[in-house]
Amino acid sequence: MKTKLLFATLLLAVFTVPVHAMPASTLAKACETFVDGDITKAENAVDIGFCLGFITGWTTGTNGMAQVEDDDVYIVRFKKDLTPQQAIAAFAVYINAHPELEKADVEDVLIKDFFDAKIMGLEKTKALPKATEQ
């Protein structure tokens, strides 16, 4: 139960910033070119760069985020050997299996996908020190 609450809190924390409003279909289209397209063709460069850049930036920026819940601290962690290509492949498989999520916010989909695929998780760590009265 606590993990579900933390997951919901993490979603809320990540998605309360207005810039996070891109539908998953936008990234899916770009990543489709990365996965299935000819990466040597110049006309595919924008899609490939967008997909690779978004996934790399998102995983880098999300990794290490802290979530405090009561006296516990949880850190977002990705598999240590996760490559951008593996993350892109996981997203492509997930969005193809869940076309109903194409209009959902891309970050909601990435979090659900990566948690389900067990390439992203929460690591419980030591509690933050309590403030002392002076």
Image (cartoon, helix red, strand yellow):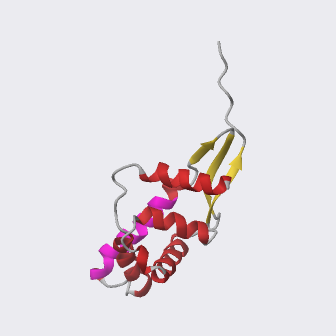
Instruction: Report the quarter where the N terminus lies.
Output: bottom right
In this rendering, the answer to whether 94 lies above or below 64 is below
Q: Position of residue 87 (x, y in %)?
A: 53, 71
Q: Position of residue 25 (x, y in %)?
A: 36, 74
Residue plotted at (70% across, 38% down)? 127
In this rendering, the answer to whether 105 lies above or below 134 is below
In the drawing, does residue 45 fall left or right of residue 116? left
Asked which quadrant contains residue 49, the reply is bottom left
Q: Position of residue 56 (x, y in %)?
A: 47, 64
In this rendering, the answer to whether 88 lies above or below 71 is below
Viewer-closest of 79 and 102: 102
Q: What range is drawn magenta here?
A: 43-59
Q: Position of residue 109 (x, y in %)?
A: 47, 67
Q: Is residue 53 magenta?
A: yes
- Furthest toward the left, the residue is 43
In the drawing, does residue 107 fall left or right of residue 6? left
Asked which quadrant contains residue 63, the reply is bottom right
In this rendering, the answer to whether 16 lies above or below 110 is above
